Image: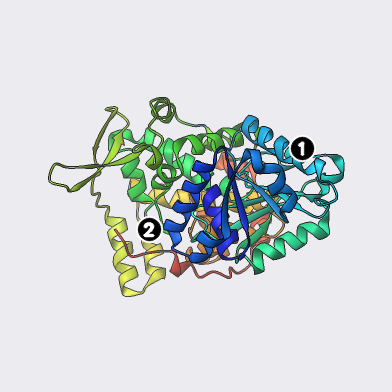
Amino acid sequence: MGRNVSAIFASFGHAKVYMVSRDIDKSESARDKAYQSVRAESVKNNMYPADYSMLEDCVKESDIVFESSAENWNVKSAVTAQIAEAAAKHMDECRNTVFCTGSSGLSITALSEIFPEELRRNYMGMHMFNPPYSMTLCEMTPTAHSNRELFEAAMDYCRSVLFRTVVEVKDSPAFLGNRIGFQFINSALQYAERYKDNGGIDYIDAILGPFTGRNMAPLMTSNFVGLDVHKAIADNLYQNTDDFAHEDFIFPEFADKLIAEGNLGRKSGGGLYKTVLHDSGAKIHLVYDIGAGIYRPVMKYTFPFAEAMIDAFHEGDYDKAFRVLTNNHSLEAKIGCGFLLKYVLYSLRATELVGYEISSADDAMAAGFNWCPPLAMIQAFGGTDSFATLCRERISPDILKRIDLANLLRRVEPSKYDYRRFVRAKR
């Protein structure tokens, strides 16, 4: 992620970027990989490999210092302390430097307080999403100490120079995008365990496929980002939040077992899914069978409700497709509809708690996950009144007791996104 963000600064920002890591060889390798990803000459020409022995000079010369170390407090605080020490030695040069972290959920205020008091005003969160070339969301988080003028200048830079979709969020666990996204993803992981005899992981992903508004199915997304990262986000939310979806953040035991065995996902060669080469050279796509504890070939599931929805999309009749979803009484349709309703409700509630504008959830999910945004999803269900009726019929009374549905929906406004561009006629 660090190299990809460096490439964003180098290519979109046309900035001279010092790419600092433990040793120069790692930095050179990272620069080369960044170039291979986008093939932009600006990446190759504007990125300068460096190591920690050069950190002080890099900090002194930079207008923005962006930290992108592992999402672990001990690691991040140690790296931040090194940056703070270098900045303190060059206070005059760093008086207007923006110091920021790419943390996906640690306390930005706590990190800022590692800096000398005079520089805490310069510190902020700048959380981009992976891969940043296609996911343009940038969550910007001020702290209790942030200088508002400098913070707004940084937001404008990200928006107008780096072409990010900027959302200001409060300093809260996992911020907004991951709070919403991982409620959905971790809940899907729990459902995979609950329905392991029906197929488990690929069964749930098949229910929540592209035809429901996700470019990548939720558990495939977990496999992409890594189970270790998924667990860190879910555990952080479970430990530090308390809302109506609190239990959705309990990380399943089988996934803990996969992590302990080193099966983290795509980055480790296998996790929830993995791909192996047959002797013939053909790729075989496998999925972890929770019940059997082994990998098996991914299954092709055929659900009548999904087939009918996809047929309606092919006809261009989107209203019909969502009527199919809400009127079908199969287990799979009920699971799919329930997930989407709760996704919208949780998005609206999370925006109240973490965001500043109701539209922030739409920007977060469209630009950070390429998922159909919640306000747009309400339109897919036929508008606010139809959505409210569905919630009263389908959502657990225990949840409805914990939220004021009428008040929550009172803030709803038309989405600037068209839900039809997110739902795909894909099996």
In the displayed structure, 215 sits above or below 205; it is below
- The amino acid beneath tag 2 is Pro
Tell which tag, 2 or 1, sits nearer the viewer: 1
Q: Is residue 232 above or below residue 36?
A: above
The percent coordinates of residue 172 (x first, y second) are: 69, 43
The answer to whether residue 353 is visible is no
Depth order, front residue of 237/413? 237
- The residue pinned by badge 2 equals 210
- Count of residue discs: 2
Query: The residue tagged with tag 1: helix, strand or loop?
Result: helix
Q: In the rendered structure, which amino acid carries the disc numbered 1?
A: Glu
Q: Which mark is residue 85?
A: 1
Tell me: 198 left or right of 108. left
Q: Residue placed at 42% from the left, 38% from the top? A: 189
Q: Pick the residue in front: 418 or 336.
A: 418
Q: Specify which label sits upstream in the sequence, 2 or 1.
A: 1
User: Along the horizontal axis of the image, is 317 left or right of 110?
Assistant: left
Distance of mark 2 from mark 1, alpha carbons? 48 Å
